[in-house]
Image (spheres, rainbow, N blue to C red):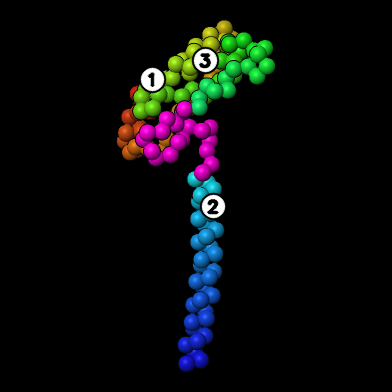
């Protein structure tokens, strides 16, 4: 009987340790899952536009920047949701960047990605369409 009580206490202690570890792991997963990189991932809901706030801060803070300078400040270009078409504000900014690149003969690196929604095959095909 004494052996049984020791086993029960030991089991309870192990469960408490496991519970603390599980709570810590869950908290870390939530913290990592809630962080965003650039605001381009709105979650799994299809009704939410992941780029709804795009372009909200592209204007001059004090009004002294021209529209062209404000467009130069944009360095991330978003596509329409589930499409290979760029957003209109991204096209305007990209045109300004292209003009500057042609004038200066500069080289750039283009990188792209899709969010986690959709299958791997679908996202690969969407990325291929966007690359063209």
Q: Which residue is denoted by mark 3 in the rendering? A: 93
Mark 1 surroundings within 10 Å by alpha-carbon count, few (fewer than 14), some (14 through 19), many (20 or more): some
* Looking at the image, residue 126 lies above or below residue 36: above
The kind of secondary structure element at disc 3 is: helix
Report the front residue among 116 and 63.
Answer: 63
Q: Distance between the Cα atoms at labels 3 and 1?
A: 14 Å
- Where is residue 82 shown, x and y percent of the image? 36, 28
Mark 2 surroundings within 10 Å by alpha-carbon count, few (fewer than 14), some (14 through 19), many (20 or more): few
Going 48% across and 18% down the picture, which residue do you hit? 90
Instruction: Let me know if residue 59 is in the magenta part.
Output: no
Going 44% across and 31% down the picture, which residue do you hit? 50
Query: Which mark identifies residue 28?
Result: 2
On screen, residue 32 versus residue 115, left or right, reads: right
- Where is residue 80 shown, x and y percent of the image? 40, 24
The kind of secondary structure element at disc 1 is: loop
Mark 3 surroundings within 10 Å by alpha-carbon count, few (fewer than 14), some (14 through 19), many (20 or more): many
Q: Is residue 113 visible?
A: no
First to last magenta residue range = 34-52
Report the front residue among 97 and 73.
Answer: 73
Q: Earlier in the sequence, mark 3 or mark 2?
A: 2
Could you tell me if the residues under marks 1 and 2 are in contact, i.e. CB atoms within 8 Å?
no
- Where is residue 21 shown, x and y percent of the image? 53, 63
* Looking at the image, residue 40 lies above or below residue 89: below
Q: Earlier in the sequence, mark 3 or mark 1?
A: 1
Query: Which mark identifies residue 85?
Result: 1
């Amino acid at each position: 009987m004494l052996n049984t009580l020791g086993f029960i206490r030991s089991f309870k202690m192990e469960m408490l340790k496991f519970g603390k570890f599980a709570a810590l792991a869950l908290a870390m997963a939530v913290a990592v899952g809630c962080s965003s990189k650039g605001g381009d991932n709105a979650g799994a809901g299809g009704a939410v536009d992941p780029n709804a706030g795009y372009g909200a801060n592209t204007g001059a803070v004090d009004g002294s920047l021209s529209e062209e300078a404000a467009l130069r400040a944009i360095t991330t270009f978003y596509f329409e949701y589930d499409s290979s078409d760029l957003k209109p504000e991204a096209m305007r900014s990209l045109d300004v960047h292209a003009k500057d690149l042609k004038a200066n003969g500069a080289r750039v690196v283009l990188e792209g990605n899709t969010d986690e929604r959709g299958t791997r095959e679908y996202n690969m095909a969407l990325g291929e369409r966007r690359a063209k």
